[in-house]
Amino acid sequence: MKSLPYFCRGEVIRGFGRGSKELGIPTANFPDSVVDHLPADISTGIYYGWACVSNGDVYKMVMSIGWNPYYKNTKKSMETHVIHTFKEDFYGEILSVVMVGYIRPERSYDSLEALITAINNDIEEAKAKLDLPEHLKLRDDNFFTSAGSSPSAPPPNTASTSQTIMNGH
Ligand code: ADP
Ligand code: MG
């Protein structure tokens, strides 16, 4: 996928309450404005990369890009699980991510247990891949330290709302 690494950021919105948190794997949802900007070659499936909430630390993440049931599966959704335990939810805050690599396509599972096992395998794969030197360097990218993570002071090359997109920064 030639669009990787892909940088984007946007406000964390409420998802569909599918109980990800109850499974121990909460996923922060991006609004349509971010999803709609995804390059065409970014297919559905599971990705790994780096993520940061507002001006916080940068953590490893796994992201699922899938078909959004709210729109009868005609639109994509982007859901990021940050590999970190947060003290509180961060709805309404700005999530900045860089998608670094692709793990696998989406698939359905026979049981909840099988799904959780698959996600935990994805998390382990993400952790290992992101420790490679070429991926570690993206953690320190200017993208994560730029003022763009504050909605009140966007950098000059972004739109003026909190739901901004950046790539090739
Ligand atoms: P929703 O259906 O609203 O997306 P989830 O059960 O998927 O609900 O929970 C997602 C929310 O949990 C995020 O929007 C965020 O505020 C919070 N959250 C807490 N810890 C994490 C984490 N490690 N990764 C992603 N989201 C988290
Ligand atoms: Mg979610």
Image (cartoon, rainbow, N blue to C red):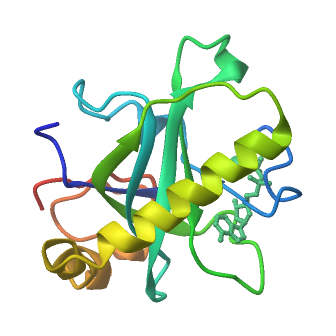
Residue at 24% over, 57% down = 158
Q: Is residue 7 above or below residue 89?
A: above
Q: Quadrant of ligand 1?
A: bottom right
Query: Looking at the image, which residue is at 15% across and 60% down?
Result: 157
Q: Is residue 123 visible from the viewing direction of this image? A: yes
Relative to the observer, which residue lies in front, 116 or 50? 116
Q: Hey, which quadrant is residue 155 in on the image?
A: bottom left
- Residue 73 pos. (x, y %): 61, 14
Q: Residue 141, percent across and down? A: 19, 79
Left or right: residue 14 versus residue 166 is right
Q: Residue at x 51, y 66 (%)?
A: 124
Image quarter where the C terminus lies is bottom left
In the picture, residue 50 is in which quadrant? bottom left
Residue 145: % across, % down? 28, 85
| 87 w.r.t. 150: above or below | below
Residue 11 can be seen, yes or no: no
In the image, residue 15 above or below residue 12:
above
Residue 135 rendering spot, x and y as whole percentages: 21, 72
Point out the image quarter for the N terminus.
Answer: top left
